[in-house]
Image: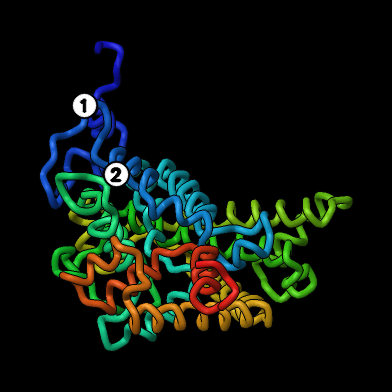
Amino acid sequence: MDNLNLRSQIEAQEEKLLAPYAMKSKDSQGRQYPEEEHPYRTCFQRDRDRIIHSTAFRRLEYKTQVFVNHEGDHFRTRLTHTIEVTQISRSIARALRLNEDLAEAIALAHDLGHTPFGHAGEDTLHEIMKDNGGFEHNWQSLRTVDFLEEKYPEFPGLNLSYEVREGIIKHETDYDKPYPEEFSPQEHPVLEAQIVNLADEIAYNCHDIDDGLYSRVLSEKTLEEVELWRVLYKKCRESYSNLTPSQIRHYMVRQMINWEVSDLLQTTSQRIKELGIESVAQVRSASEQIVKFSPEMQNLNAQLKNFLYEQMYRHYRMVRMADKAKRILSDLFEAYLENPEQLPGSTREKLKTQDKMRVVCDYIAGMTDRFAQLEYKKLFDPFERV
């Protein structure tokens, strides 16, 4: 055992190497259901592994990021997006001397509750459930790791640590739904959770441009409207005159990510210094979140988001896909609600103790794109074998 890096040794290394405001594994607020600690993995490393081995994580491979899976093999899925957010989060955490394992676990779990067909699916379920508690993917992600995953005989869900669960529920969202009292709504999450918020934004902004160019929904010419692109594109052309469109696309995405990450690191490092942050308690009680872009980068990102919304997300191909997704999920929901006997046995069993609307919502939210499409054909195509 002398040559093993034991948990206690890793925790001692964290105390020595991480910044005073980083979240240390040994200081975690623990799990909902007490468990004996692992001999050579910290609590956050254990959380990371549980997430990776979960059913919900595997399903991300066939859930939409922007383009439905069958549109092409090279478009991002919810899984590849999650991996990219995780990579960016770890890089930021390492540079700021934060807990990489915690940042990684939160990043890996942040989209587990996403529906099939991306935000179109989420909007559809939210509309259906508006009088029954609504639907929001951060809450669904927490519900997934706390309740819907069935892996262990001793407890429901994955029994993740408080800090990972807090990072999931406090991931920034368009829906202004209050946090549960369990997670101290008046407090900010730890810095490791805050960096995942912006790593997510960096990943989807830059990689949506990549997929938009690859699909030809966007073009280099239309992107000249975006200052962030325009500045870097000029430098690209000045440095390299004979690049192929594919090389330009990949070069630009790399440079955009690097610019945004560098800005975030410099701004956040300066804010930590100016605010005199020296502990996790100070992070939580700060007047506002500490991890931020500079005002200049915030403006550039706002322009980029507006461009993507107008030129990509409202493109007729996206609108068609969203409309199709709404019909599929709405019809499936109505069919299951009218005749729950069409649900699989394990799901029907839940109807004995749980609200029918929520059970159907959970079942549909957990589907992959292709499962939802196949299920739709089985229920509504009279010539499809069931």
Q: Where is residue 361 in the image (x, y as percent from the top left)?
A: 34, 74
Q: Please tell me whether mark 2 sits on a helix, a strand or a loop.
A: helix
Mark number displayed over residue 39:
1
**Location of residue 259 by image quarter:** bottom right
Q: Distance between the residues labelled 1 and 2?
A: 14 Å
Quadrant of the frame with the N terminus = top left
Q: How is the image coloured?
A: rainbow
Query: Is residue 306 visible from the viewing direction of this image?
Result: no
Q: In this view, does 384 lie above or below 346?
A: below
- Which residue is pictured at 40% across the width and 56% down the height? 196
| Total marks in image | 2
Position of 235 with respect to 137 (left or right) is right
N-term-proximal mark, 1 vs 2:
1
Place of residue 237 in the rendered image (x, y in percent of width and height, measured from the top left)? 82, 56
**The disc labelled 2 sits on which kind of residue?**
Asp
Q: Is mark 1 on a helix, strand or loop?
A: loop
Determine the image quadrant of residue 223: bottom right
Which disc number belongs to residue 47? 2
Could you tell me if residue 94 is visible in this image?
yes
Where does the image place residue 278, in percent across and percent down from the top left?
24, 49
Q: Is residue 248 left or right of residue 96?
A: right
